């Protein structure tokens, strides 16, 4: 069964607790730990909604076989392809030479593509084993400064929404209004739209 597995998580989030406090109009530190949790939830929400990786992280994509073209769809933008490994017919793990495949990771708003180089073919893999093909790659915009501004605002609006849902009192619009605004800001970073 194919799927993604996180290798190295980001070391930060797109917004800090201080930025969230400024956005919420808070002037105390009592909710800092809570804000950190809400920032994490809002970030994950945005990443899943957009099929994005905001801050650079390392991932594995496990596959049951070599498809004609490997697509890296759920973790845009793709920064680099680190390695492709596979289980050969004898059951040994091999690393595929980068000279044997080509990549298209130019457009940050489109899935990354990996295909055999011209006049090459994918190697034969061992049958009957789980996840015989593994693609290691990095994804993300870079640091928080590189994340599109609309996405940053979307995260802040989602934090506002979540903060209200947890029972804290802050002035402003309804939770539903913040949810709609956050989603609109996230959607401005969707495929084909540059942030």
Image (cartoon, helix red, strand yellow):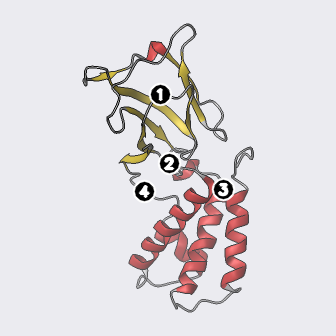
Asked if labels 4 and 1 touch by Cβ distance under 8 angstroms, the answer is: no
Q: Which residue is mark 1?
A: 66
* Mark 1 vs mark 2: in front: 1
Q: Residues within 10 Å of mark 3 (few under 14, many from 20)?
A: some
Give the percent coordinates (x, y) of residue 42.
54, 68
At x 72%, y 71%, the residue is: 181
Local secondary structure at mark 2: loop
**Mark 2 lies on residue:** 143
Q: Residues within 10 Å of mark 1 (few under 14, many from 20)?
A: some
Q: Is residue 120 above or below residue 78?
A: above
In the picture as drawn, the residue positioned furthest to the top comes out as: 119
Q: Residues under labels 4 and 3: Cα distance?
A: 17 Å
Q: Nearer the viewer, residue 166 or 172?
A: 166
- From the viewer's side, name the closer residue of 18 and 42: 42
Q: Nearer the viewer, mark 3 or mark 1?
A: 1
| Helix, strand or loop at mark 3 | helix
The label shown at residue 12 is 4
Q: As rendered, which of 134 and 174 lies closer to the eye?
A: 134
Residue pictured at 46% horizontal, 76% vertical: 35
The answer to the question of whether label 2 and label 4 lie on touching residues, with beta carbons closer than 8 A, is: yes
């Amino acid at each position: 069964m194919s799927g993604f597995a996180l290798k190295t998580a980001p070391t930060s989030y797109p917004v800090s607790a201080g930025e969230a406090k400024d956005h919420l109009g808070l002037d105390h530190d009592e909710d800092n730990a809570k804000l950190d949790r809400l920032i994490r939830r809002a970030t994950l929400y945005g990443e899943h909604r957009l099929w994005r990786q905001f801050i650079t992280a390392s991932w594995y994509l496990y596959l049951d076989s070599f498809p004609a073209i490997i697509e890296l769809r759920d973790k845009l933008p793709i920064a680099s392809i680190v390695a492709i490994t596979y289980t050969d017919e004898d059951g040994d793990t091999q690393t595929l030479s980068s000279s044997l495949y080509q990549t298209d990771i130019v457009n940050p708003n489109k899935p990354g593509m990996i295909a055999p180089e011209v006049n090459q073919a994918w190697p034969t893999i061992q049958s009957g084993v789980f996840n015989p093909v593994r693609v290691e790659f990095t994804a993300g915009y870079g640091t928080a400064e590189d994340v599109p501004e609309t996405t940053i605002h979307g995260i802040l609006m989602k934090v506002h929404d979540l903060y209200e849902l947890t029972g804290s009192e802050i002035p402003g619009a309804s939770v539903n209004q913040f949810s709609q605004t956050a989603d609109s800001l996230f959607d401005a970073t969707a495929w084909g739209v540059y942030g």
